[in-house]
Amino acid sequence: MRFSVGPASVVLGLLLLAHPAAAAGKLKVVTSFTILEDMAKEIGGNHVEVSTLVGTDGDPHAFEPTPEDAKHLAGADLVIVSGRGLEGWMDRLITASGYKGPIVTASTGVPERSMVDEEGEDSGEPGKVIPDPHAWNSVSNGKIYAKNIIAALSKADPADAAQYQKTGEEYLQQLTDLDKWIRQEFAGIPKADRKVITSHDALGYFADAYGLEFLAPVGLSTESEATAQDVAKLIQQIKAERIKAVFVENSMNQSLVKQIADETGAKIGGTLYVESLSKADGPAPTYAKMIRHNVTLMVAAMRGQ
Ligand SMILES: [Zn+2]
């Protein structure tokens, strides 16, 4: 006995035609860095296969793509970047890869903000005023990123658009709740105490959104190890500005950190994650957990806990 496969294969053919992106399996999405990777996974669920160029704990400003990266990019259905000058290395990589598909900029629609490129890392000119690329650090901007990603996935894979909308709405609700929680956390701290010293320049949008003041540590260069004089300057600054919370992330040794804490009464916080996620078993494995981790550390330090 023979099975007739004719009508069944016609039906299958029509389904594949109606579902171009899924014909070869999942929608292949390549993101520039881990925060976008997480958002695309949250929204795309099992309809997407997401990978990232800059990995966990990586620096999205500076990236040296390999020929493997170019090959990988060439096979993508959709590329998502953050934009506003963050990924200065991306255009060359796109050209090298021959990728011709859609490139979506997740920060499209976020309010403009400028920053000083202190070390010339992005502009090549130390001290130049440039667009601030770190827009994701305010959660209301994070929601704009998520909306752009929902739209991009829906356009690239229309057959699964309803699912992206549904999962996307749930994700947006999570971010709305997160934003509310952050405001409640900082509301409990007197305005004068909402000051943080940090060597990260990625928190401008965050500071604006939540009414905080971030000061760069004086006397500390990221290039060299701190001298006794550098530390003295920093201690002076902490006392003069009545800073409660200090986050430093360069080569300062633990005894110097302890000295600063002892002499100023400022609380030295832990590690802030501002432009990359941690590995899955670290403290900031998703965008939402990254923000929650940073706020928790800052609030504890501002409270002197
Ligand atoms: Zn940065």
Image: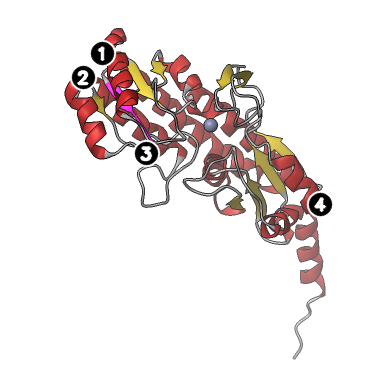
Q: Which residues are magenta?
A: 245-250
Q: Residue furthest bottom?
A: 1
Measured Cα–Cα span from mark 2 to mark 3: 20 Å
The answer to whether residue 4 shows anywhere in this view is yes
Residue beneath disc 3: 251
Real-space Cα distance between discs 3 and 1?
Answer: 22 Å
| Label whose residue precedes the other's in the sequence (2 or 3) | 3
Q: Amino acid at mark 2?
A: Thr
> Where's residue 48, x and y in %?
61, 52
Disc 2 residue crowd, few under 14, some 14–19, many 20+, Cα 10 Å? some
Q: Which residue is mark 4?
A: 98
Q: Are marks 4 and 3 in contact (CB under 8 Å)?
A: no
Q: Where in the figure is residue 113, as x and y percent of width and height?
A: 59, 16
The three-letter amino acid code for the residue at tag 3 is Ser
Reading the image, the residue beneath label 2 is: 264
Say which label, 4 or 2, has the lower sequence index. 4
| Gap in angstroms between the C-alphas marked 4 and 3 | 41 Å
Query: Is the residue marked by circle 4 packed among few (<14), some (14-19), or many (20+) residues within 10 Å?
Result: few
Circles 3 and 1, Cβ within 8 Å, touching? The answer is: no
